[in-house]
Image: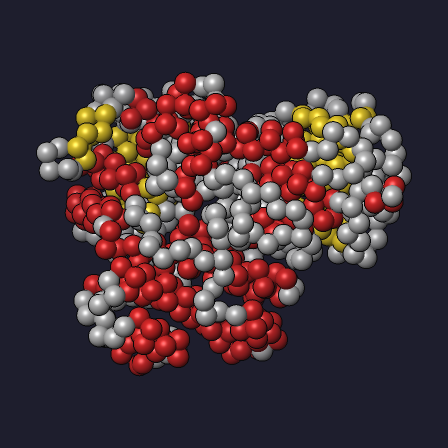
Amino acid sequence: MRADTSPSSAAPRVVVIGAGPRGIGIIERLAARRPKGPGILHLVDPHPDGGRVWRQDQSSLLWMNSRCGDVTVLPDESVRTTGPLTAGPTLYAWASRIAPRWCTDPALLAEAGLLTPHSYASRRLCGAYLSWCLRTSLDALSSGWTVLTHAVRARHVRERSDGALDVHLEGGRRLVADRVVLALGNLDGAPSPEQRVLRTFADHSGGRYVPPSYTADLDLSGIPARDPLLVRGLGLAFLDLLILLTEGRGGVFRRDASGTLAYEPSGREPTFVVASRRGLPPRARPAVPPLTPARTAPVLLTDEEIRGAAERLTSGGEAGRRAAQGELWQAVVREMAWAHYEELFTRDPRAGHMGWEAFAAVLRATPVGGPAWSVLARHITDPADRFVEPGLAPPVLPVMPSADRLTTWMRQHLHAAARRADDPRRTTDGAAQQAMVRAVETIIGVLLREGSAADTEARRLVATLAGLARRAAAGAPALRIEQLAALAGCGLVRFAGGDPAVATDPTTGTFVLRTRTLPGEEFRAARLVDAWLPDSDAVADASGLLRRMAGDGLVRMTTPATPAHGAKLATCQKTFHVLDRHGTRDDRLVALGDHAASGALGSLSRPHTNAAFFRQNDEVVDWLCAPVEARTGAPTTNVPWGADQG
């Protein structure tokens, strides 16, 4: 095994593991500092031009779930950083201005030329954008720096006797590092006991079982035409699977004279029977953006309010905990109501019996859920314009009398959702959803900064709120919802409901699907797909990197906050440093993302919102730009590299 060392022991050696949006964002912030003196940067990722999710060798039918005008990995003038601010283009601005002279792929160029700010770009095009962002950032890095890219996985990180770290790569190469950034992105889950049983049954019966995975990674050639296909999962991974096995096999979506979307089969499609935990698809993202500008912070919710609730959450006894959880949820609802009504009055100043200023004053003083809250809504003239408080728990399907009745109901639901998403009078939905995400991110940020999230109850609340924000942020394009309705309309998709359970029947060699929604029915097929992403569990990650590090004591894992949330790397909530088996902060290692106990809710950010993504990246680069010191539990000093050289 050979080790790569830096040209000089005084030159910092940095390894960034992960070349997705988070890794690129950190490198961009590092390049903006233009650190003095020599250094060496290793970037480790099997897909080093933007990461696996956004790689360019995937179908152009796989879309992003955010409009391209709402996506950026580069900061803008709204971002408050300690380092120099170098603003960069959004995905849409890049596609319209830079891609024509940078892209060489004709298909990507054609797609870029058709985009509007409200379009949903392909993940391939986003991958090209990320590649440009990375290369531009590396070009801006000081000429004294050596940059080496390794298109392989990191297998292990170990401590050296001299206090540095060894990063072991696939193939036997070993990198020596003073600082390591774990920017891993989504993890690959190991198969659960149930999944192993299902796979064994399929192997023995001649059928097929596809476990949770990334749709672009799947070989779908073994799913034959016209045969029934059982699917568990109705979310974004399912919609990707659906489109690859329909339009991807030659089918065509067309609008009839009335504007209704219909599907013309190619004859190569399977027939889908689909169920999920809730039995409902993702919400349709509003097609028309709000008129009110995006905000960088909540309107009513303050950090002091959050800190007060956090104190009661962690030390107020059972009654105090319940009260604090209720207060924080009510604070989220108030932010949503404010955004809803502000958007409503912006669109129609005569929407209520009083003007916006007077209405806002009453709204500001009205507690959520009380009698006055209900009275407030009556000031809005049209009942359809009144804010409807969402539930903290997601909705679920009721019991249905038959599969045909369920599919009819679902088609009506899908058409109504798509119409509402396209309705310019319903821009209040988008405004309220943005406010929810903004409020939840703020609450989680304060809980993490204050250290409250180390408490078990607080961690459960963080997990619940994070899930809520993800559901709000992860809606599907309205066209995808229309396409699902069209496929149900021509008989290619049947809905089976919620809470699915799968059994196996060796006598027929089939999987048997039953649900809570249709207790009297069962569905059979020789093939089953679990269409969701693998659980983000640092212990069960199939790569084994984090598990090996934990085995050596270099890191430790948190206990899952809920059964639905996997273990994470334990990290310092304020600085993202990894904690070792003794709970001591390691000043050589940071971790951000879904595999870690701290970090932003997402990676690709919304522009003009001072997103936490950029502030966190800047915090990490403050640490990267500190002198290399021996491992201690004390905070590092923010001294730029090369400062000791005068």
Is residue 3 in view from this perspective?
yes
Can you name the residue that lies furthest to the bottom here?
371
Residue drawn at (27%, 21%) of the image = 250
Instruction: Give the side of residue 558 with respect to residue 121, left or right.
Output: right
Q: In the displayed structure, would residue 354 be above or below residue 180?
A: below
**Rendered image quadrant of residue 554:** top right
Pick whichever, 601 or 335, lies toward us.
335
Q: Is residue 166 above or below residue 368?
A: above
Task: Residue at 36% x, 57% y: name it.
Answer: 292
- Counting from the top left corner in percent of width and height, residue 34 is at 71, 39
Q: Is residue 90 above or below residue 424?
A: above
**Does residue 335 appear left or right of residue 623 in this picture?**
left
Q: Residue furthest left?
A: 257
Is residue 63 visible in the rendered image? The answer is: no
In the rendered picture of this protein, how many numbered marks are placed on residues? 0
**What x and y, as percent, mark residue 330?**
42, 71
| Quarter occupied by the C terminus | top right
In the figure, is residue 494 to the left or right of 373?
A: left
Question: Residue 300: x and y, percent?
Answer: 46, 70
